[in-house]
Amino acid sequence: MEAGQPSRTAMSAARYRAAHQILENGEIFTDPLAVRILGLPEDELLADAPRRAMRVFIAARTRFAEDALAAAVTRGVRHLVVLGAGLDTFAYRNPHPGLRVTEVDHPDTQAWKQVRLAESGIEVPASLTYLGVDFERESLAGRLELDGPAFFLWLGVVPYLTLEGFGETLRAVASRPGNEVVFDYAQSPSRMAPDRREQLEARAARVARLGEPWLTYFEPDEIAAQLTALGFTEVEDQGPSQLASTYFDRHDVPPDTPGGHVLRARI
């Protein structure tokens, strides 16, 4: 990120979520505020529409995360922490009475979001708190006021962190028994078939030019070992094969196909 500027990849993710509402009618993930918060004309909003694979992955990871959150609320969790919130709209359409939400993000991105909310006429609920944190320079530990187990929603962030920044935040999540987290991660482009690798490397180059390069990749066994070492249990890791089966009724994707993963774990 450039100093004094909001995250441009947060804007990109928000555009994909909004485009899914228009092009797929929110079939995977429904968000009635996704288009509104952006305030863009439809032709500009759909400028990236040909990138369907990324668009539906972002929709699927959000659906996976919010389904897991609903299950956690049923078990009694009453606090959601959205890490790297960007233009995420959950707090403004929260369907769970009694669920408090804390949005954690870089202060520059938060200031931009609050302008977008005001200009879009989206009300900020009393159940929401903002917490400004730079994940690479500040620790989350000790900054959150939690009076019980919390659910951490951490989407579209991990690839942009250093290993140190990722580990520091994950340890903070692991500090309280009962905490649960959902995050996504990417396998290295070197694992991909040549055509897919070329596409990913081109996307990596684009976000690097925006000042937000991809820094961290994981393999499933690596991330599983790290989570186990910190005491996480109930690890559920959905890669391309599982996501295709769950959300697209496609059962032809081989189980070991590399790509983007969405993972849930509870401490």
Image (spheres, rainbow, N blue to C red):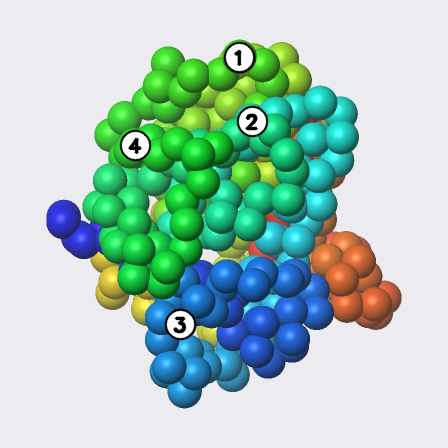
Q: Position of residue 19 (x, y in %)?
A: 52, 74
- Please report the residue visible at 25 percent of the width from the left and 65 percent of the height from the top: 209
The disc placed on residue 210 is none
Q: Position of residue 64 (x, y in %)?
A: 68, 49
Q: Which residue is mark 4?
A: 133
Q: Amino acid at mark 4?
A: Val
The disc placed on residue 147 is 1
Secondary structure type for disc 1: loop
Q: Which quarter of the image is occupied by the C terminus?
A: top right
Q: Amino acid at mark 1?
A: Asp
- In this picture, residue 263 sits left or right of residue 217: right
Q: Which residue is mark 3?
A: 202
> Mark 4 to mark 1: distance in Å?
20 Å
Q: Earlier in the sequence, mark 3 or mark 2?
A: 2
Q: Which residue is mark 2?
A: 79
Q: Earlier in the sequence, mark 2 or mark 4?
A: 2
Vertical position of residue 75 compared to residue 261: above or below: above
Q: Amino acid at mark 3?
A: Ala
The answer to whether residue 254 is visible is no
Crowding at dot 1, Cα within 10 Å, few <14 / some 14-19 / many 20+, comes out as: few
> Mark 3 to mark 1: distance in Å?
44 Å
Q: Earlier in the sequence, mark 4 or mark 3?
A: 4
The reply to whether the C-beta atoms of the residues labelled 2 and 1 are less than 8 Å apart is: yes
